[in-house]
Amino acid sequence: MFRRKIYDKLLEWKKESDGKTALLIEGARRIGKSTVAEEFAKNEYESYILIDFSTASKATRDLFEDISDLNYVFLQLQLQFRVDLKERKSLIVFDEVQRCPLARQAIKHLVHDHRYDYIETGSLISIRKNVRDIVIPSEERKLDMYPMDYEEFLWAIGDNTSFQLIRQFFEMGKPLGQQVNRQMLRSFRLYMLVGGMPQAVEAYVETNNFRMTDAVKRDILRLYEEDFMKVDPTGRASLLFDSIPAQLNKNASRYQVSGVLNGQARANDILPLIAEMNDSKTVLISYHANDPGAGMSANKDLTRFKMFICDTGLFTTLMFKDRDFTENEIYEKLLNDKLPANLGYLYENVVAQILTANGNDLFYFTFFNESTKHNYEVDFLMSRKNKVCPIEVKSSGYRKHTSLDLFCTQYADRILRKYLVYTKDFARDAEVLCIPVYMTPFL
């Protein structure tokens, strides 16, 4: 198993909760929820039972039809899984709990019983689809899980020092130097290409072959599309998902739903579907902030949004979905920044991924400037204290930031800090902090 930061959060939960709450790990499929839950169970408890509800027998499922006699339920589980449960020293994992809603409902009574600890894992939209007729337990603490971040990726490829050294340079406000910056950019682009899905990272580490890695990512993309078809048989969700790279490439001020769905629907016609896709954590939605300030969540426009993919490695593969596989040559050119294409939208996706994993809601802002008679856009807005931090993303070292400057002039009293994320070394341009993209996790 790869080293994952969420493991420390599981340790915190175990210590703080002391069995008074269950833990629900939510996230997209194939990000490693089941793996980390089982590893935690093996290391931190004397015994455990993992019930995978995607393969569980009818006998196991039927146990949750009637939980009035918990002694009977626990005896049956121990018999079926041949595991000796020990009071306050054992963990029961409900894997893919969305496939057995009654098991999730039983959490309330299981936690009150207090004999054992409980972790649930849930994937995609179906975790919400399958809870309409059950009582959601208040004794459930939720924890979001995302694909491997850049530091976790570096750990996986054997680099345990670079990330913390980069952090020190960021905190000092000092450049790394051209040579080191080029090395760090190449390493970060490798992360953008491989991504943070554990299976893809494993394929890269074991084979050092982009084609093999790409094949794994294509399998995951097919799995996501099949899941979308299950919850939306019309195919609209799958089509919206597949069109994300093309939509971002257009550099439009919003995701053009009508164009993707051939005029059969507009954004305000499918708001519930967009919300479900966002809840799935397979996609990331950045909403337009109608009033850019500390309270952007209350002033977002639900009909104006941009859509990103939870993992930039998957995004890269989806960009070239029209081919049977993404050739190693394309990967090599992307890795060495030699592909003759504007890849600004690829960098926007990785920034969206990092901001989300760090606990930020995604917002952007468009505005018309009277003096220039042009429309402008700020790629991302972060809320900090009672102010905002605008972010402009560039796929090159170009340091011009007109949109950022005009926005900060128009909303000067609301600005805390302003950032340009690009591919050159750390620098300051007046009040704008210009940071290489690999420093985005420190914002």
Image (cartoon, rainbow, N blue to C red):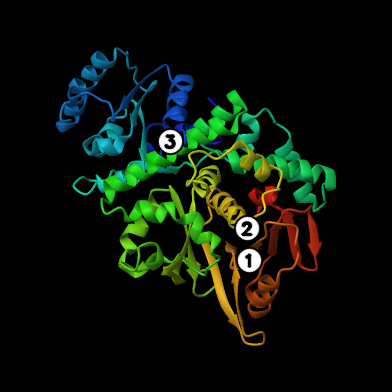
Q: Label 3 amino acid? A: Asp
Residue 252: x and y in percent read 52, 68
- Whether 217 is drawn above or below 273: the answer is above
Write down the residue under mark 3: 219
Q: Label 1 amino acid? A: Pro
Write down the residue under mark 1: 390
Residue 344 image label: 2
Residue 161: x and y in percent read 73, 33
Q: Label 2 amino acid? A: Gly
Residue drawn where x is 18% and y is 25% of the image:
58
Residue drawn where x is 18% and y is 47% of the image:
133
Q: Residues within 10 Å of mark 2 (few under 14, many from 20)?
A: some
Q: Residues within 10 Å of mark 3 (few under 14, many from 20)?
A: few
Tell how many labels. 3
Residue drawn where x is 69% and y is 65% of the image:
418
Residue 266, image quadrant? bottom left
Q: Nearer the viewer, residue 333 or 184?
A: 333
Q: Residues within 10 Å of mark 1 (few under 14, many from 20)?
A: many
> Is 188 on the left or on the right of 52, as rendered?
right
Instruction: Find the distance from the CA under tag 1 to the CA under tag 3.
Output: 36 Å
Q: Nearer the viewer, residue 184 or 63?
A: 184
